[in-house]
Amino acid sequence: GAGVSQSPSNKVTEKGKDVELRCDPISGHTALYWYRQSLGQGLEFLIYFQGNSAPDKSGLPSDRFSAERTGGSVSTLTIQRTQQEDSAVYLCASNDGTDTGELFFGEGSRLTVL
Amino acid sequence: TQLLEQSPQFLSIQEGENLTVYCNSSSVFSSLQWYRQEPGEGPVLLVTVVTGGEVKKLKRLTFQFGDARKDSSLHITAAQPGDTGLYLCAGQTYTGGFKTIFGAGTRLFVKA
């Protein structure tokens, strides 16, 4: 597709369940980011993939959070044993990996943990 | 840890007024971007500034990058209701690749 695609767009789950969020970046983009945004707030950095380099996981809030990027393309963010405080919009973005590269965002996955 | 602090966090003004949003850090950035986000959508790039002291204009929006490349400002002249949204500054630093971090955002509401 032409843009960044995320799925699901909405996910409602029960506390303690695991969830997987998927991101399909723009073809050819070497850099992929996951951010978390709580209602009305800014973007909290979670994890950053750049080419074949080891991912920068410094923003993951706990060991319940993990992410993979297979074949340098699609990425999956997994949250294990979800908690109510995990409720937020999870945004994926990609760019060409340069310092001036525009970040292109998906529409986000809204996660609600009951 | 690089942090970007934005101020104010919230701004409610009348149509026609001017405003300035600030983005500050103790870290040096190779470049800085401003994004605008509307409800239910991802942020969209407004501008990228690269050189210390650089000023860029986009219609009624003026962006400035500080001389030391640690801070930036966004000035809007004669704000319109269509300017309403969340404005986010984002800095790029090199950590094995160019990583982008965001400020907390400034929510602007322009009343007609």
Image: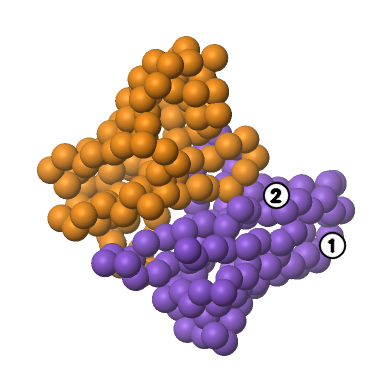
Q: Nearer the viewer, residue A81 or B91?
A: A81
Three-letter residue code for mark 1: Glu
Residues packed near mark 1 inside 10 Å, few (<14), some (14 to 19) or many (20 plus): few
Residue underneath mark 2: B107
* Chain of the residue under the numbered disc 1 shown in the image: B
Q: Residue at x 51, y 74 (%)?
A: B27
Q: Disc count in the image?
A: 2
Q: Residue at x 36, y 36 (%)?
A: A63
* Residue depicted at x 68% and y 54%: B106
Q: Quadrant of residue A90?
A: top left
Q: Position of residue A61 (x, y in %)?
A: 45, 41
Circle 2 residues within 10 Å: few <14, some 14–19, many ≥20? many
Closer-to-camera residue (B18/B4): B4
Q: Is residue A34 left or right of residue B103?
A: left
Question: What secondary structure is marked by label 1?
Answer: loop
Q: Nearer the viewer, mark 2 or mark 1?
A: 2
The amino acid pointed to by label 2 is Arg
Kindly tell me whether residue B111 is visible in this rendering: yes
Q: Which residue is mark 1?
A: B17
- Check the rendered structure and report the hue given to chain B: purple
- Chain A: its colour in the image is orange
Work out whether mark 2 precedes mark 1 in sequence or the reverse, and give the earlier one. 1
Residue A106 visible in the snapshot: no
Q: Is residue B104 left or right of residue A91?
A: right
- Position in image of residue A85 (x %, y %): 55, 29
**Going 32% across and 30% down the picture, which residue do you hit?**
A78
